[in-house]
Image (cartoon, rainbow, N blue to C red):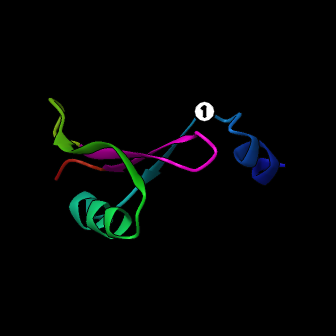
């Protein structure tokens, strides 16, 4: 069911936790993913980046503050 929603672009946004936001960003960018936001450190210390998948879903990757 989730795969069907993702394929239709109906979930809108998914957030994944990663141990290294910058490495995740480099890997996805080099694979040709559409960048929506380069890695950025937020006020609370978390670091995140975002991509758009081919169906229009926003995929955000977040690294917890140290």
The residue positioned farthest toward the right in the image shown: 1
- Position of residue 50 relative to residue 23, above or below, is above
Q: Main secondary structure of the magenta part?
A: strand
- Position of residue 36 relative to residue 24, above or below, is above
16 in magenta = no
Task: Look at 59% across and 50% down and name the residue there.
Answer: 54
Task: Look at 26% across and 66% down and name the residue there.
Answer: 26
60 in magenta = yes
Q: Position of residue 33 (x, y in %)?
A: 42, 58
Q: Position of residue 14 (x, y in %)?
A: 54, 42
- Position of residue 42 relative to residue 16, above or below, is above
Q: Mark 1 sits on what residue? A: 12
Label 1 SS: loop
- Quarter residue 40 falls in: top left
Q: Position of residue 49 (x, y in %)?
A: 30, 46
Binning the other alpha carbons within 10 Å of mark 1 as few (below 14), some (14 to 19) or many (20 upward) gives: some
State how many labels appear. Answer: 1
**Camera-side residue of 25 and 16:** 25
Q: Position of residue 25 (x, y in %)?
A: 29, 60
The residue positioned farthest toward the top in the image shown: 43
Q: Horizontal placement of 23 versus 35: left or right?
A: left
Q: Which residues are magenta?
A: 47-62
Q: Horizontal placement of 56 versus 17: left or right?
A: right
Task: Look at 14% across and 29% down and name the residue there.
Answer: 43
């Amino acid at each position: 069911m989730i795969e069907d929603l993702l394929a239709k672009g109906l979930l809108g946004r998914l957030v994944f936790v990663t141990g290294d936001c910058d490495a995740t960003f480099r890997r996805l960018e080099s694979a040709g993913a559409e960048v929506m936001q380069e890695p950025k450190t937020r006020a609370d210390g978390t670091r995140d980046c975002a991509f758009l998948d081919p169906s229009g879903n926003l995929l955000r990757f977040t690294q917890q503050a140290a």
